[in-house]
């Protein structure tokens, strides 16, 4: 049917059924295949250009908003780190809020998060660890 010819079926007596027979190529065989491949390549190039255009437009849109998106993600991360259940006890105290800046509290949150698996072992030594972290922050 690709070249406009119908396939032929021949009855095979050995299997008692109909079997298709391969047809000889028509005079339009070469032209039809060239047209098929050119159309396929043309559609592929057209769709690829559309994809590149959409991705470029999207990139330009987010490039213009990148600083705002970065600050939003940073604030979200700070809020997430600050309100972790294991940091609430230590970082919401008035003394901690008055003595530490936001950056120091963020680093302290990360330090607490990294030391959290050791908390049952270091429970009595946590204050000393917190003081050492503050000291290293101020030196940095």
Image (cartoon, rainbow, N blue to C red):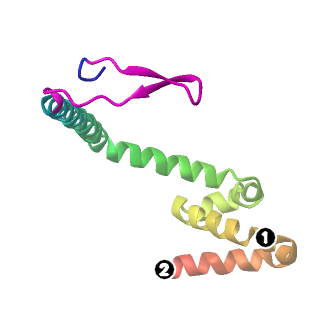
Secondary structure category for the residue under label 2: loop
Is residue 22 found inside the magenta-colored segment of the image?
yes
Q: As rendered, which of 138 and 20 lies closer to the eye? A: 20
Is residue 131 found inside the magenta-colored segment of the image?
no
Q: Is residue 127 left or right of residue 101?
A: right
> Eyeballing the image, is 137 above or below 56?
below
Q: Is residue 69 left or right of residue 34?
A: right
Q: As rendered, which of 96 and 137 lies closer to the eye? A: 137
Secondary structure category for the residue under label 1: helix
Q: Residue at x 19, y 33 (%)?
A: 33
Mark 1 surroundings: few (<14), some (14-19) or many (≥20) residues within 10 A: few
Quadrant including the N terminus: top left
Q: As rendered, which of 77 and 44 lies closer to the eye? A: 44
Mark 1 and mark 2 in contact (Cβ < 8 Å)? no
Q: Where does the image place residue 95, in percent across and percent down from the top left?
A: 69, 61
Q: Where does the image place residue 39, in percent across and percent down from the top left?
A: 19, 30
> In which image quadrant can residue 47 be found?
top left
For the residues labelled 2 and 1, the Cα–Cα distance comes to 25 Å
Q: Is residue 106 left or right of residue 128?
A: left
Check disc 2 and report the residue beneath it.
140
Q: Is residue 12 left or right of residue 7?
A: right
Q: Residue at x 42, y 48 (%)?
A: 71
Q: Residue at x 76, y 53 (%)?
A: 85
Q: Which mark is residue 104?
A: none
The total number of labels drawn is 2
Mark 2 surroundings: few (<14), some (14-19) or many (≥20) residues within 10 A: few
Q: Residue at x 27, y 18 (%)?
A: 5
Q: Where does the image place residue 106, in percent across and percent down from the top left?
A: 57, 61
> Eyeballing the image, is 9 above or below 44?
above
Check disc 1 and report the residue beneath it.
117
Q: Earlier in the sequence, mark 2 or mark 1?
A: 1
Magenta region: 5-29
């Amino acid at each position: 049917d690709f070249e406009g010819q119908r396939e032929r079926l021949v009855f095979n007596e050995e299997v008692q059924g109909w079997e298709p027979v391969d047809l000889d190529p028509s005079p339009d065989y070469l032209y039809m295949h060239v047209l098929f491949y050119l159309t396929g390549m043309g559609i592929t190039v057209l769709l690829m250009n559309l994809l590149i255009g959409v991705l470029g437009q999207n990139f330009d849109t987010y490039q213009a908003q990148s600083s705002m998106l970065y600050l939003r993600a940073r604030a979200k991360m700070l809020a997430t780190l600050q309100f972790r259940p294991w940091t609430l006890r230590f970082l919401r105290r008035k003394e901690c809020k008055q003595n530490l800046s936001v950056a120091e509290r963020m680093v302290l949150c990360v330090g607490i998060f990294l030391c959290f698996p050791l908390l049952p072992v270091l429970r009595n030594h946590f204050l000393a660890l917190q003081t050492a972290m503050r000291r290293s922050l101020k030196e940095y």
